[in-house]
Image (cartoon, helix red, strand yellow):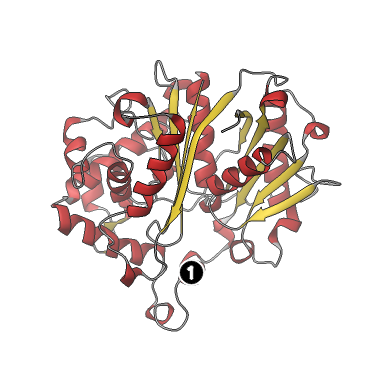
Amino acid sequence: MDKVAIVGVGQTKYERRKKDDSFAEMVYEVTVKALEDAGLTVKDIENVVSVSNDFWDGRTISSMAIQDACGSRHKDISTVEGDGLFGALYGLMRVLSGSFGTTLVVAHNKPSESRMPLITNGMFDPLYARALGLDSISSSALQARAYMDAFGITAEQCARVSVKNHGNARRNPLAHLPLEITVEDVLKSRPLSDPLKLLDVSPISDGAAAVIVANEKSAVKAKKKPVWIKGVGHCSDAYHLGDRDLARSPALVAASRKAYAMAGIKDPAVEIDVVELYDAFSYMELMWLEGLGFCAEGGAGALTERGVTALGGDLPVNPSGGVLSAHAVLVAGLARLIEAVLQVRGEAGEHQVSGCRTALAHGINGPCGQGHCVMIVGE
């Protein structure tokens, strides 16, 4: 793969409700931050990829609300309706095409102005599954139960993920929900959909994020040392939940293997220093670690017992606090990429992991991780 880098990043603070900020104001904030971070101006940006969704925004052609705010006037702009990391993938492909030297990827979401159960119900088949009332929480509860039953994963092991990530968020000033909690607090929190409880589930957060993707010629002009995209992979599983084994994630296995092969990584547990993955629910961190090849199938639960996934442990996972601590739905995967970039730069502040040279970012699309994107970044 030709050399392509992330040269600028920007995020808002993630909050329960940004009542004083419009979509455009959030996007303008992160666009300016990313440009300043890269030492570039909007004139240096050759095209824009926006990540938005008509259902979440409550309008058709949702990207039109933010086109001026991200400086897309007289530029090619396209929209990805899904997770932000897939938007970064699209931005990468646009640069690799040779048509553009720089791409601004920007994602925004205000779930506080939406009805999450109704919107996420809309991602299911309209004839059979949607009428059952399935949404992101109830469908993920089905997956959590299937995974726990298949491999003997306990509620306590899942709860340790929540304790770790909310604790890590206390070192991240942009996180929505930094908490000092115990396993018992998680287990005693309000049941939502068995086996998921309130503290197993990510919060509803408003926020936005942006990255600037550049080819080698443009990247060397940036203010800071480029963080190179070493490898990327993406794969999707079957749409209908009944057509999939919910206890396993073969699409993630395939996506990660593609990314590792491209990056020349043979042993991810040894060669990757930090993992930022999409943990919308506590059990997902365990499932996705297995799919990413950091442990054997069903083996991630034991990692929590040894503290391996704790900040500063053998494999720091979500040192930022992850999605469990801030979930602006369409933004979350792009935030994982930004956190991975900051780790490689050594600019992650209080949640910086010492000696990070290579980091992994992960995003998902669709119910129960139907689609996965994995991106490896490094020096």
Residue 173 visible in the current orientation: no
- The x, y position of residue 256, in whole percent, is 39, 42
On screen, 13 above or below 23? above
Give the residue type at disc 1. Met
Give the quarter of the image for residue 31.
top right
Mark 1 element type: loop
- The x, y position of residue 327, in whole percent, is 48, 48
- The x, y position of residue 304, in whole percent, is 21, 37
Residue at 21 percent of width and 51 percent of height: 187
Residue at 43 percent of width and 78 percent of height: 130
For the residue carrying disc 1, how many other residues have a C-alpha within 10 Å: few (<14), some (14-19), or many (20+)? Answer: some
Horizontal side of residue 369 vs 106, given as left or right: left
Q: Residue furthest right?
A: 74
Residue at 49 percent of width and 22 percent of height: 344
Residue 154 visible in the current orientation: yes
Horizontal side of residue 13 vs 65, given as left or right: left
Q: Residue furthest top?
A: 355
> Where does label 1 land, which residue?
123
Q: Quadrant of the N terminus?
A: top right
Question: Residue 171 versus residue 273: which sits nearer the camera?
Answer: 273
